[in-house]
Image (cartoon, rainbow, N blue to C red):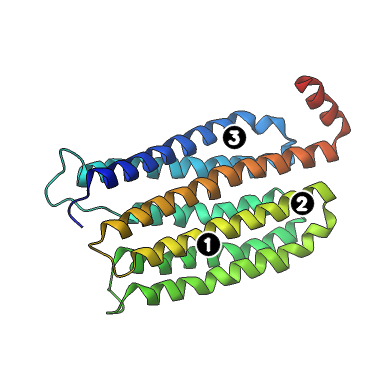
Amino acid sequence: METISDGGYLVVYNVLSLGIASMLFTTIFLFIAKDRVLPKYRMAIMVSATVTGIAAYHYFRMFDNFIEVFGPEAVEGATFNVGYRYVDWFLTVPLLLVETVAVLALAAAVQRSLLVRLIPAAALMIALGYPGDARLDLLYEGDASLWGLFSTIPFLYILYVLFVELGKSLERQSAPVQRRLKELRLLLLATWGVYPIAFIFNMGAVESETGFIAREVGYSVADILAKCLFGLMIFSIARMKSAEDDAEFAKVENREHA
């Protein structure tokens, strides 16, 4: 697709701008607020901030690339690089799973067991989705649906680990933390579900403005929820667990908010 309507341009322009603001200021907040939880939960907060920080950088790159391709002074021959998103996801999706496990403060052996399964599966999911979305027929002369199917296999495995294997660890958490963690998993499921929908919208629609806009809006909204809102929920869980672990900490925090 070489051109885009004025209305379509504004929609994508604004949603990418929203992505930059959301990622950047969530990163700043998390870095500043990390001391409001006990030390053993700070790693989860720092990983959350790293996720949104990486995403903010890539949203700046996507924003500039979009203007270069479709803006008023578009560069002739420039192409929109969906690879920026996939590099971002290749780094941030495994880290999202790391922060989910880290905030539970599980035994080291349990954490290691979960992460050695989740991280490779997440990397494989992203790597398999990229050729279809970017239309790279390097290994297979076919449509994007095959790559989408390949990418779905590790996605389903990740869901199994999160909802079945990780679910076993929730029994040792307090009732309020259990509720928040269940909400966290549902948020992950709901937001990750947007990605294949946006992928499908764009399949077979390389020259379609509607497919392009649906993909970029869908991916951006899902990113904001899956990274910013997810990170803030991780912070909330860390605060709850800090208060449960240390009564004096909870007393000091409550007094400061009084």
Query: How many numbered marks does the figure carry?
Result: 3
Q: Is residue 196 above or below residue 25?
A: below
3D distance between C-alphas at marks 1 and 3: 26 Å
Of mark 2 and mark 1, the one earlier in the sequence is 2
Q: Quadrant of residue 159?
A: bottom right
Q: Residue 257 location in percent, x, y?
A: 76, 22
Identify the residue shown where x is 78% and y is 38%.
Answer: 242
In front: label 1 or label 3: 1
Q: Residues within 10 Å of mark 2 (few under 14, many from 20)?
A: few
Identify the residue shown where x is 75% and y is 36%.
Answer: 38
At mark 1, the secondary structure is helix
**Residue type, label 1:** Gly
Q: The C terminus is located in which quarter?
A: top right
Left or right: residue 58 compared with residue 227: left
Identify the residue shown where x is 37% and y is 64%.
Answer: 201
Residue on which disc 2 sits: 179
Q: Report if residue 43 is visible in the image.
A: no
Q: Residue 103 location in percent, x, y?
A: 70, 48
**Residue type, label 3:** Leu
Residue on which disc 1 sits: 193
Residue on which disc 3 sits: 30
Q: Is residue 246 above or below residue 134?
A: above
Left or right: residue 46 compared with residue 171: left
Q: Residues within 10 Å of mark 1 (few under 14, many from 20)?
A: few
Q: Report if residue 115 is visible in the image.
A: yes
**Residue type, label 2:** Arg
At mark 2, the secondary structure is helix
Asked whether 65 or 197 is in front, the reply is: 197
Of mark 2 and mark 3, the one earlier in the sequence is 3
Identify the residue shown where x is 66% and y is 67%.
Answer: 161
